[in-house]
Image: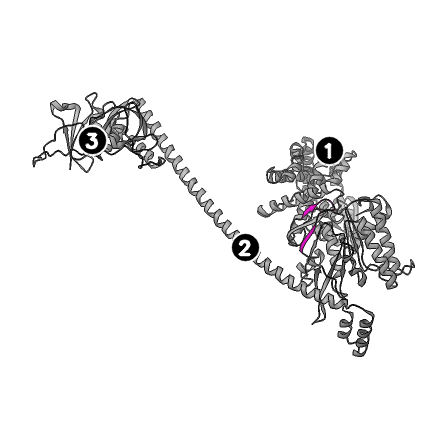
Amino acid sequence: MTPAETPFQDSVASNAFLETLELLEWSSLCEHLSSFSSTTQGRRSCVSLPIPNEIAHSRSLLEETKEIDLLDRILEGGLSFQGVHEIKHTIQLCMKGGIASGEELLALASTLASARRLRRQIDDEEVRPRLTKQVNDLVTLPDLERTLKFGLEDGGHVADRASADLAAYRRKMQMTRKERSDRMNQLIRTYGSLLNDHVIAERKGRPVLAVKSTAAAQVLGLVLDTSASGSTVFIEPQEVIQFGNILTQIEIKVLEEEQRLLAIWSREVEKNIDALERLDRILLQLDLALARARYSRFIGAIPPDLLEGNDCPIVLSKLRHPLLLWYQLQGKGTAVMPISVNIEPDLRVVAITGPNTGGKTVCLKTVGLAALMARVGLFLPCSGSPKIPWFQNVLADIGDDQSIQQSLSTFSSHIKRIQRIFKALDVHEGSSLVLLDEIGAGTDPSEGTALAISLLRTLADKSRLTIATTHFGELKSLKYSDSRFENASVAFDSETLSPTYQLQWGIPGRSNALSIARRLGLPDEVITKAQDFLNRTSELDVNTIIEGLEQQRNRQQAAAENAAALLARTELLHEELLSRWRKDSEETEQRKETERRKLLASIEEGQKEVRSLISQLRDGSADGERVRVVGQRLRRIEFENRAEIKRSDSIEWQPQIGERIRLLALGKAGVVLDISEDGLQVTVRCGVLRSKVNLQSVESLDGRKPKKTSTNVEVNVPLAKNKTHNVRTSVNTVDVRGLRVHEAEIVVEDFLRNVSGTIWIVHGIGTGKLKKGLRKWLESLPYVERVSDAAQQDGGGGCSVVCLK
């Protein structure tokens, strides 16, 4: 990043920010990011990755990373930038009136086609609103693309079809070369004995004969070369020199025509400069978003919640240093120990203490890199739901910058950096993160302690958060006098006398200098005297207090881990139940969809049957049997797909004359016209249909069944052994006059379910189709013994008597 790209106008403040990027090794992370870019311009932009100066821009970059990450996951093979080339140079050349080469123009056409494909893949406003908004601004210029691809062949060569003159020149050139080649072959046959080689050679772009030096005078022409031994002279025969001259002239014309076409196409590019520049810029943004997503996925990072303001917490669970994690994933390093950062909104300063080589500096760099990564739209390598404020300033003093040439000691180098940090805080107000390593070190301990306390209290007023590492014991007690301060420490295993690289919050750390000295072999006598001196000079054994706090912290940590395990099991159970519910819901929806499709298929089948029947009726090819069969099929479809009506049997109901009721057999509503004296039959009008049906064959419109009568009249009629007809009554008679065959079948079939013995069917005489259709259908029923005409007094030919088995 150049100073112009920093968020500071002041040179001192800008240098402080650039120095921070160098201390945090930000350039190494950018190099890693660039390896995931798909284009040359994308890799170059990743190396000098710009850092946004507004939180809205950072949040937009994060959303772009989320959207393109999801798209890259669901597309087979991922999102591809194949065919996208760097066109910035071509655009600038054409804008200045220059002529682009064929290769450059063909690369431009390929980029236009690839941009159109990417727009189709990305365009989905509901799922990817931010990316869709970007690609909607893409103008892919299909006419320009077609023009360039028509006029150019692979490799950027201008095609013959681009111009009639160009095609003519090239044909003439080909014919001239063939004619020259034929003439050369004739000369080889003519001068065969004078030649050292019977092939056509080439010197200086001209065809020559390899003539023996002793016979050179016998072959007229131009000597263009001589062999190293001098035994061969390469001569262009006089007879073909004119062909070479002609070819040179044609080549000049071809070149001029090609340049003319390239100039025309370059001017077309110049006309669309604005659209092409916008396209190049959008493609670069998409490539950077895809690189951020793939890099984040490689290191196992998750999107953070980027917060605004100075009153928001910092929650980073199991955060890992991205550079160390990269080396681990590349197989070049050991496993990275994660740290957890949980800082309340009102905290301003965190003092990290602990032994050397315990990981204090790594903690500083990890938090600093996390702040920068979130700012440029990268995910964070941590777990849970990370929350981090948007830090406008990330400033650091890490390491030792002493210089003999500049007469800077360790202490002086730290002070110089801190001075630049304060300058940056004064120049640019905003949410700032300050990282200080070994604050106050390199000078007299008492003065260094006083200076460190003063610096931290001043930074608590100026910055959002300051994290400082120190060995000064006085800094550990600041939290007890100022609520804005907090202690943290890197854990140390007292048994193995080695650091665990775990960050502990709430308690200060011990330097463990005497323990480390004993482990490294310092004489016990020296260690004992040092311990005695330490006891005499301390009124309160701070280390004992710290040790007790560490034990308490360990107990709390164990309890927290148990609670977290219980919570995890609860979440797993919740997920399992939720998964089962979703599975059941999906199966229910699938069943409903299957039934719906079945119903639609049945309806479509019925519609086809009706259309076919209507067509046959119109042309007169349909008979009664055809109508009856279609009626049965439609009735079957209706019964199979009729929605079940919940009927209440608990409420008694009796139909009244004039009341609207439902015929169960037809599933249609009708009006009661008359009720028999015994109340067991009703006369119903349904449309144009007028029929007398059994009481149990109807119900109310709200689903109530008719009240069952308690009066049973028993009539004993002696029957003859030869099964003669019974007496016709209203109970065993059904009237189907005025119905079609299939409608009459429904009424009779329903009537047969509720009676036994002999029944009379009144169908009338009319055309005879109804009688014929019913007779044929009844004779096909297995439980019908015979069908005959009724007696003359019972209706004769207009009534059929059905004897049941």
In front of the other: 663 or 788:
663
Q: How far apart are marks 1 and 2 (CA)?
A: 57 Å
For label 2, the residue is: 570
Closer mark to the observer between disc 1 and disc 2: 2
Residue 192 at least partly seen: no
| Residues at discs 3 and 1 in contact (Cβ within 8 Å) | no
Reading the image, the residue beneath label 3 is: 776
Q: How crowded is mark 2: few (under 14 residues within 10 Å), some or many (20 or more)?
A: few
Q: Which of marks 2 and 3 is nearer the N terminus?
A: 2
Q: What residue is shown at x 60% (from left), y 46% (from top)?
A: 70
- Residue where numbered disc 1 is placed: 274
- Residue 781 in percent (x, y) is at 20, 36
Q: Which amino acid does label 1 sit on?
A: Asp
Residue located farthest toward the left when viewing the structure as drawn: 721
Residue 676, placed above or below residue 571: above
> Is residue 647 found left or right of 291 in the rendered image?
left
Magenta stretch, residue numbers: 304-318
Return the residue nearer the eye: 486 or 600.
486
